[in-house]
Image (cartoon, rainbow, N blue to C red):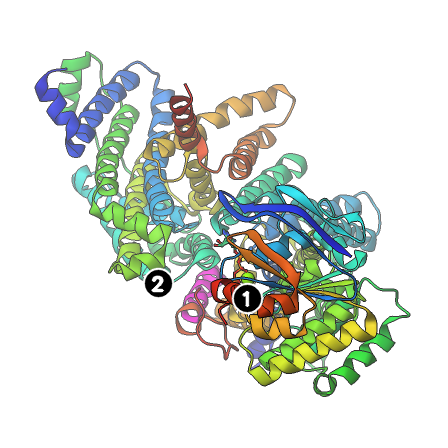
Amino acid sequence: MLDIRDLTAAYGPVTALDGVSFTAPEGKITAVLGANGAGKTSLLRTISGLLRPTKGTAYLAGKDLSRVPVERMSRLGLAHVPEGRGVITELTVEENLRLGGLGRSARAKPADLERIYTLFPKMADRRHKTAHVLSGGERQMLVIGRALLATPKVLLLDEPSLGLAPRIVAQIFDLLKSLVESDGLTIVLVEQNARSALSIADYGVVLNLGKLVVHDDAAVLAADDKLRHAYLGF
Amino acid sequence: MQQFLTTALTGLTQGMIYAAFALALVLIWRSTRIVNFAQAPMAMITVYIALVIIDAGYSYWLGFAAALLSGLLLGAVVERVAIRPVEDKPHINAVILTLGLFIVIHALAAVIFGSNYRSFPAPFGLSGFRVGDVNVALTGFSVFTILAVLAVMLLLVLLFRFTNVGLMMRASAFNQEVARLLGVRVTRMLTQGWALAAMVGSLSGLLIAGGNLVHPSYMDSVVVFGFVAAVLGGLDSPIGAVVGGLILGVSLSFVSGYIGSEVIALAALVILMVVLLLRPGGLFSHAPARRV
Amino acid sequence: MTAFAQRIWASTLGRHLLLAGLGLVAVALVLENTSAFRNGQFAVMAYMGIAAGGLTVLTGLNGQLSLGHGAFMAIGAYTTALLLDDYESAPPLILVLLAATAVALVIGAGVGVAAARLHGPYIAGATLALAIAVPGIALYFQGTLGGEQGLTVVVPDVPNWFADAAYFITANDVSSSKYVAYIGWFSLIVSYVLLANLSRSRVGRIWRAVRDDDVAAEIAGINLGRARVLAFVVSTACAGLAGAVLALAVRLAAPSGFMLTLSLALLSAVVLGGLGSLLGALIGAALLTFLPQVVTSIGLDAGLTDLQAAELAPLVYGLTTMLVVILAPAGIVGTARAARRRRRSHP
Ligand SMILES: Nc1ncnc2c1ncn2[C@@H]1O[C@H](COP(=O)(O)OP(=O)(O)OP(=O)(O)O)[C@@H](O)[C@H]1O
Ligand SMILES: [Mg+2]
């Protein structure tokens, strides 16, 4: 579904991503792991066009993304939930959600919004409050819900567990798992929290200093003691 | 008592105009973090367009509409051509750029329309109502002024609250990156925001001009008053800008009535400094102090 | 070069004094060989240059924008006019210049204390308000400040010692307008030497540190407020001096001379020349002084009326300012320096 080929990107002189290639298969969760500064965020930003590759390409269902403007990505079926969540706190909960569905046809929307509210009942109660009042976990749910409203084929998530209590993280990961099962969604999940991520992922990719170290089944990665000690810290 | 009432009413009318102008500044500030000091001459030159049309014998309303429309267009062009190249540069560049634009439009108006005073008509009466033997200072034109500004505010509220375009404009103002990831064409939203703001600026220009004399710098002090009003309201808040405009309008009217019209700019400066030093976040902020 | 000259060149002050001396000679040569009309223009260039020099230090070195320097020029000019209101009891001219500088400095300190706490658009807005407000004061205090008509300035006679010295060196008589031009350029050279030394000194380094990163500067123990106020005060003192020269040159201090356009013209002078560069400020002042004549005559030839043609100059420098900000934010001097550096590194 999402094919990464030799992707290379830099911030001026700093190379953040160096010839990374792997495939995130349809209907599966691929975890992207690595230490701080490994290039995980840069990988997602390069896929969604916020950062332009200096070399290599990402293909979404065969389509070359390297020249597609960021604004077009959601229409092509790529949703990117950025690091630090990306809730627009000045807008209300419902307005945040409405933004997610803007690219869609007018008829499909109302039903979807209701679906999100049944998935997250707490959000329904506060739909007209500014998103400022939501807790960290609720904000994460909000942005996932918002991304779903665009009915993406591929969902890129950047550290959804950041700063959340283990119980909330477990809830969110369960939700992701169920989405993959019910909607056939393809997820690329960037995580520092490697243990939890590998527990729900089908495949894992480990980055270090911008380079791909290994790409394998999640279970294999989780069982590899040496790798765990060297890159994953558990 | 009568003078007090007259002064208050005049201030209220002026305040509505400052409110509209401040609103235009706030719209742009929110989306691009730029104070558009060129807003005043931009409004001025569109008012001249209206004047040319009216002087050519067409109706006031045709001129009115033409001014608003050319404001819309001018705002979009300015954003595209001049502002976009400096949007990601240090803020001082943008400030200097708007001032350069200030000089340019000023000079352009003087070259094209001349720099002498010209009178601008008003579509409604300019003398007050009589209630018994009291002359109320509310003229037909000031009623129109108040209603026009209220209508614009209402339209803006409807636009921003209830339409998708409005939602996308707000999202672009608050978080460009997230908006882009959600499929919002942020650059287009910024252009539209500037266009809208310039149109509101033109409206305030028309309202100030009505029944008065216009010349290329007739709006210069208004940019200061609009800025002060916007800062009173916190610079980020459209509602704050409106309230700030009203407060400023009434205050300056009293300064003008009881001290002298020469010192109203000085009074505005004093109000600005007091607010910035005591309540830098504006009169209504609860948030912790902000760097101003 | 002799060893002595080299030693002087090596010290900052020595170098600046040497340049100042050369500048003085150049000024004398130019003023003695040009018409009275040109002398008048050079006086204008001198006061614009002084004010632009102060502004470029404030904006370029300290990062504070002021759109209100025209107001401080007004303060200097009105001070001069009040002191030089009649022929008999006029104090010595040097005292008048110092007084104008001092008054602008004191008021600048007051404004600077407030401005030092402001950032970005707020300081721009506040100083813009100042520029709009100050002419109103002259209108309000019509009795002392002369209202719309303003105050006329009586330029003192050329002192005998000056006339004698000038005659001895140049064999020319010194007209009043030439005298004013000399005063203007002498003031400019003195103020530029002071500004140049200040900007090379510890104070200048502190200003740059505050401009580049105020948080880091504060952590390094710099008192931000004091640094900003000092920069503001130095800058307004220059504007005050410039105002005094202006009053002498036009023999009048009136509100119409200090409208917003003056402050904006100053700003575009420093932007055109290159923010932070005294040479740039001087070039900018020269452009503002000499461009109008050229452009206006082109406009007249193209069939514009006098009034229209007079507005072509601001049109041109306003447009140039915008283009500079968009295309070459370093201004004339900064761009030239960068080009020279580039040529050196890729021969
Ligand atoms: N805006 C930027 N400008 C310059 N360099 C950057 C920028 N963003 C990231 N980098 C550099 O690129 C490299 C990769 O950073 P990236 O943010 O992709 O890492 P990451 O794996 O997401 O780290 P973390 O786990 O801390 O989020 C790092 O060396 C980082 O310093
Ligand atoms: Mg990251």
Q: Is residue A23 above or below residue B271?
A: above
Chain label for disc 1? B
Mark number, residue C114: 2
Looking at the image, which residue is at 30% across and 13% down? C33
User: Is residue B264 magenta-colored?
Assistant: yes
Looking at the image, which residue is at 24% across and 42% down? C86
Front one among B64 and A28: A28
Looking at the image, which residue is at 31% across and 40% down? C242
Question: What is the three-letter code of the residue carrying label 2?
Answer: Ala
Say what secondary structure mark 1 lies in: loop
Chain label for disc 2? C
| Magenta stretch bounds | B259-275
Say if residue A145 shows up in the picture: yes
Front one among A63 and B2: A63
Place of residue C316 in the rendered image (x, y in percent of width and height, measured from the top left): 55, 31
Q: Is residue C324 above or below residue B88?
A: above
Question: What is the three-letter code of the residue carrying label 1?
Answer: Leu
Front one among C326 and A174: A174
Q: Name the residue carrying label 1.
A: B235
